[in-house]
Each structure stands twice: as structure tokens, then as C-alpha cells.
Image (cartoon, grey):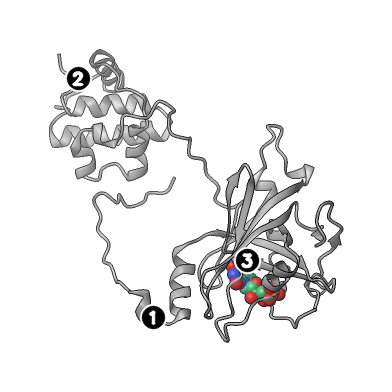
Amino acid sequence: MNETPNPSVMSWHFEGWDPANLDTPSVQNLLHGAVGPRPIALASTINLKGQVNLSPFSFFNVFSAKPPVLIFSPALRVRDGSSKHTLLNVMELPEVVIQVVPFAMVEQVSLASSEFAEGVNEFQKAGLTALPSLKVAPPRVAESPIQMECKVLEVKPLGSSGGAGNLVICEVLYFHVAREVILPTGSIDPYAVDAVARLGGDWYTRSSMGLFQVEKPVRTCGIGVDALPPWLRETGCLDGNRLARLGNQPTIPNPERCREIFKEQFPDCSFDPQSPEGRRELAKAMRQLLDQGRTEHALALAMISSGAAED
Ligand SMILES: Cc1cc2nc3c(=O)[nH]c(=O)nc-3n(C[C@H](O)[C@H](O)[C@H](O)COP(=O)(O)O)c2cc1C
């Protein structure tokens, strides 16, 4: 993992804004930059005339597993406060298919977000293929490896002027998942899906790039960063991620084990482990041990540095 500043020792220089004093595009700009990457729902809907609509929404996420609930939010147009076609459609016919957007189709999806006139089918405009759904009327997008057929439980308006969101609360009735993106464990393979997500401005990211794993915290609850010798945080010699890895250890090794590990790491030790030079040496070794996944060893050196493992 890259070196990142330790938030416990660095200080930011803040600007501040009260949204009440900003115009809507400026608030949008802050929100889009602040809350990201955001997953993208590619929503297909249909009105009572049978006209199909397809549009992306990045104000989107999952909120419940039982029932399985997704929410996305078509906002009233900032320009004139009018409703987007997707919103009008789900009010007429409360059904939607939400598809995940892989990198391979991101530019088609961006094209589908154009303000085409009412009744224009964005499947055709974006060159995407409509497949019939099993449980709902709107069609699915064949190019997406994950398609979720939903009924709309509720539409919750958040305001009445341009920029106001409308929460479209959807229950998934059926999942279609391409076999090619399912791992032998049954989980979905983020590399194979390669979903895109949106940030501020024109920025996107994709799930196959820069993936890394963080183990879930130990079930028994770790010792916590506050159980570590304070000098480790105060000097910033370990960044926040490495401190957290130590704090996630279930227990502190006993003094004897700490001394054993210390001797193993420094067989010919010629420094005082509690002196500033000694602590610098220990911190270097701890960083290496942590990066090798030998967290217990690193924690033992931390305890030695504080004198907690003395006879
Ligand atoms: C990646 C992406 C994400 C978007 N997310 C949203 C969103 O969350 N809410 C929204 O109102 N518009 C969003 N838009 C803009 C809509 O897609 C756009 O207004 C579209 O024309 C709406 O289509 P409709 O009127 O056919 O429903 C997004 C556009 C893109 C390209």
C-alpha cells in the first residue's frame, strides 16, 4: 500500500461553506467531489404508452438485503425544476431494471444520459440491446453482466425546486448475473465485472483498477490503537493504516513472547529499545514486519519499545 499521511499527526487547512449561501450548481459540485466514487445504476423504465427509457444515476446504492432494496435518485432538473423521464415513468408504472455498468460500456451509458426528447429510446441512441425481463415490463440491457429487476416500493421527493432528489426505493424481484462474473466461492468477481463509478467533474473510476483487500476486523474486537504505546502515534512513524493493523490484533503477546520476538529480530542488539534511536530502529523493523503480514511480531516490538515487556 502507498505511503499516506498519518491523519493523527498531519493537519489539514480547511475552507468552509454553508450550503444556504451557495447556488445549486456549487452545492452539486461539492457533493459530487466529496461523495465518490459512487456506483452507477443504469435504470430502464417504461411508461404506460410503452415508451422505454434508459438513463444512468450515480445517486445510487443498496440499503437492505431482506427485503433486497436499492435506491436511486433522479433529481428535478436544475435548469427549470422539471422531472426527468425516468421519474415520470416510475410514477406511471412502478417498475425498473437496474443494471451495473462495466467499463466496456461506459461511453454508451454516458451517451444514454443525454437529454433526448420524451419518447426517444436511449437503448437505440446508445446502441445497447434490449432483452425482455421476467418479472417486470421494462427491458434489460444485454451488455450488462448484472441486471436487477425491481418493483418500485415508494418514490420519496426531497424538495420541489431544481436539484431536489427523488428517492426511488426499489425492491429487487430477480437477479440476472452472468456466469462469467461469478467466482467458484459464489461471490461476484470485481475484476470480471469491472464496474465503473463516478466522482466529481468528468472523473470515473473502474473496479478492476487498483483493487486491494482489507481484512474484516477480528470478530472478538481488536485491542485498539489506544492500547499501543503513545509514541507510535505521536511521532507519526507508522501511518494510520499500519497503526490500525496493530490495533486489530486480538491480544497483546505476553512479555516473554515479546522478548523472544525481539531477540529473534535483533540477535546482536546494541541499542536501548526505549531510546529515540532504538525506537527509530524498532519502527523500521515494525514497518517491514507489518508489510510482510507478521503483525504479532510487529506488536511485540511495539510493546518492547514502551518497556511493557520488561521483567
Ligand atoms: C454517470 C452518470 C450519473 C448520473 N447520475 C445522476 C443522478 O444520480 N441523478 C440525476 O438526476 N441525474 C444523473 N445523471 C444525469 C441523468 O442521467 C440525465 O439527466 C438523463 O438525461 C436523465 O434521463 P431521463 O430524463 O431520460 O430520465 C447522471 C449522468 C451520468 C452520465
Image x and y of residue 8, in percent = 26, 49
Q: Which residue in the protein does label 1 denote?
A: 22
Disc 3 beta carbon < 8 A from ligand 1?
yes
Marks 2 and 1, the one that precedes in the sequence: 1
Instruction: Please tell me whether residue 269 is drawn above or below residue 98 in the rendered image.
Output: above
Q: Residue at x 26, y 19 (%)?
A: 258
The quarter of the rendered structure image containing the N terminus is top left
Which element carries disc 3, helix, strand or loop? strand
Marks 1 and 3, the one that precedes in the sequence: 1
Closer to the eye: label 3 or 2: 3
The three-letter code of the residue at mark 3 reads: Phe
The quarter of the rendered structure image containing the C terminus is top left
Image x and y of residue 67, in percent = 64, 44
Q: Which residue in the protein does label 3 denote?
A: 57
Labels 3 and 2 touching (C-beta < 8 A)? no
Please state if 159 lies on the left or on the right of 171 as rendered. Answer: left
Circle 3 crowding by C-alpha within 10 Å: few under 14, some 14–19, many from 20: many
State the residue lying farthest toward the bottom: 80
Q: Which residue in the protein does label 2 denote?
A: 309
Marks 3 and 2, the one that precedes in the sequence: 3
Disc 2 beta carbon < 8 A from ligand 1?
no
Q: CA distance from mark 1 to mark 3?
A: 23 Å
The three-letter code of the residue at mark 2 reads: Ala
Q: CA distance from mark 3 to mark 2?
A: 55 Å
Instruction: Please tell me whether residue 239 is drawn above or below residue 286 in the rendered image.
Output: below
Q: Residue at x 57, y 82 (%)?
A: 81
Q: Residue at x 74, y 47 (%)?
A: 175
Q: Residue at x 77, y 44 (%)?
A: 180
Q: Return the residue nearer the eye: 222 or 19.
A: 19
